[in-house]
Image: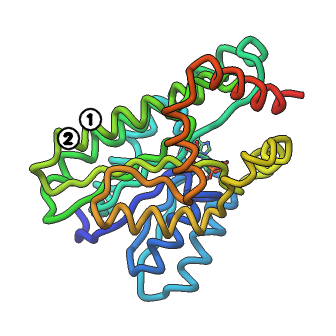
Amino acid sequence: MAEQRIFTLVTGASNGIGQALAEDSALRGDNVLLVALPEPKLEEVTNALKAQYPNQEFHCLGKDLMQKEAPQEIYDWCREKGFVIDKLMNNAGLGNSGAFDTKTSQFYYGQMQLNMVNLVMLTHLFLKDLKTLPQAYILNVASMAAFYDIPYKGIYSASKRFVYSFSRSLRKELEASNVEVTVLCPAAVLTNPDVLARNEQMGFFSKLTQATPQEVAEYTIDRMLKGKAVAIPKAVPRFYKALGRIIPYNMKMNILAKQFIKQQQ
Ligand SMILES: NC(=O)c1ccc[n+]([C@@H]2O[C@H](COP(=O)([O-])OP(=O)(O)OC[C@H]3O[C@@H](n4cnc5c(N)ncnc54)[C@H](OP(=O)(O)O)[C@@H]3O)[C@@H](O)[C@H]2O)c1
């Protein structure tokens, strides 16, 4: 086996929040492993980091995390290369909009595999190694959607509720250990063209929640390194979450349905 070096591993690192998490980790001096779909952008982001931080190590691996075997292949790659992970950032995920029956069953199967199943599998594979280090971190990316039942976005919000619940319970299990678990619950983050277009259709109050990927990454890594359970970037989403607790359920559902039906029009 090769000589061991310590890395942060980020999934979905070729764009959006994942790219910003990789870049912010590099800025803090970490070596970074970038995993995403095998597209040219992944190499581009990795090469840019190599050029900017010549004294740190950056490697990328193209994998489709909708595939069942991907987590084991990522783990095996790390073992073979002698990459030791001390920060596992499970970021890759897929949203959706529109009425439930307007998407194929294969779409939902892939979305659930990516957002939930493979996030759990990666965590399960790496946890035994994380436990052997003096200090280690798991960052799981959920969403503000985790706190609501969202019509026209039901599988997405349910999958993010799963990530939130899994992260909080795992954190409790590991509280006496060296492994901190943080769950990121951002509101609207200005990442890919799809998200930008969807946010354009949202109302004034939703637009108030918007953040850039860089703002989200910096805030979240600070929270993670402080060992915080939850990261909700920006004050407005934190206020909306508190408000959500006092609004009656049916009223909340009507507001959400009205907001999110706009995304399919
Ligand atoms: N943007 C938001 O408003 C927002 C809000 C709350 C939560 N989130 C969550 O934050 C995370 C990142 O979102 P984002 O908006 O930054 O997404 P994004 O800009 O679309 O980037 C997603 C990243 O994941 C990669 N990816 C997509 N499908 C993949 C697959 N099957 N296997 C491996 N990698 C895959 C993409 O690779 P390619 O570039 O090659 O496609 C890209 O690197 C997601 O979990 C999302 O649910 C986002």
148 vs 263, left or right, is: left
User: Disc 1 designates what residue?
Assistant: 169
Residue pictured at 9% horizontal, 50% vertical: 176
Q: Residues within 10 Å of mark 1 (few under 14, many from 20)?
A: few
Quarter location, residue 47: bottom right
262 vs 239, left or right, is: right
Q: Nearer the viewer, residue 201 or 51?
A: 201
Q: Nearer the viewer, residue 132 or 212?
A: 212
Say which amino acid is labelled 2. Lys
Residue pictured at 46% horizontal, 30% vertical: 161
82 lies above or below 98: below
Residue extending farthest left: 176
Residue pictured at 40% horizontal, 47% vertical: 183
How far from the left and from the top, in percent, is residue 163?
42, 35
User: Disc 2 designates what residue?
Assistant: 172
3 lies above or below 123: below
